[in-house]
Amino acid sequence: MKVERILESKGGAVFSVHVDAIVSDALQSMDEKNIGALMVIDSQENIQGIVSERDIMRNCFRNQANVKGLAIRDVMTPRAKLLVARAEDDVNDLMGAMTQNHIRHIPVVNEQDKVVGMVSIGDIIKAMLKDKDYQIRHLKDYIESKYPL
């Protein structure tokens, strides 16, 4: 299964925060949208990084920081360290990379390095379960001779 199949079912909506924003703005947006990560962009909508709930929590704990004045750029994963996927990537490879790197969200980019979607580990598991259910149903129908000969 390819990443594009997940994006087709969930859509390509990507929520973001400006690189100059503060952490409390990002937390408010994540809470309102019930999501765990935001793309960090600049004024030209170029990717600057990603910020997740985990990034914020770890940084606040390590530095005993208050989210009210903490800058996104100080807690985000910068573009240079960001793992990205492409629509044609295999979902199994993506899941392996996410597991190996202990990350839950990967942006999907096109050839121009523009974000076209975001895939979470939950999206991958949901798609894989749906695919397995489909395969099981068809194998069961085959075994029960529900297909014409």
Image (cartoon, grey):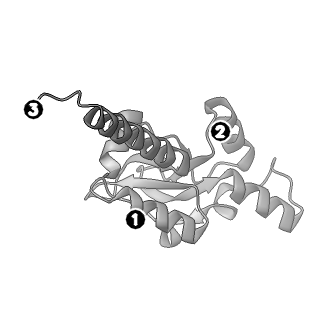
Q: Residue shown at 41%/38% (left/top)?
A: 133
Neighbourhood count class around disc 1 (C-alpha, 10 Å): few under 14, some 14–19, many 20 upward: few
- For label 1, the residue is 93
**x, y (%) of residue 58?**
78, 62
Q: Considering depth in this image, is 141 or 88 the residue closer to the camera?
A: 141
- For label 2, the residue is 30
* Left or right of 43 on screen, residue 100: right
Three-letter code, disc 3: Leu
Examine the rendering and report whether any part of residue 11 can be seen: no
Q: Secondary structure at mark 2?
A: helix
Q: Residue shown at 65%/39% (left/top)?
A: 30
Q: Between tags 3 and 1, which lies in front?
A: 3
**Quick one: label 3 or label 1, which is nearer the N terminus?**
1
Q: Considering depth in this image, is 137 or 69 the residue closer to the camera?
A: 137
Determine the CA span between mark 3 and mark 1: 37 Å
Q: Residue shown at 50%/47% (left/top)?
A: 125
Q: Does the CB distance between marks 2 and 1 fall below 8 Å?
A: no
Determine the CA span between mark 3 and mark 2: 53 Å
Q: Secondary structure at mark 3?
A: loop
Q: Which mark is residue 149?
A: 3
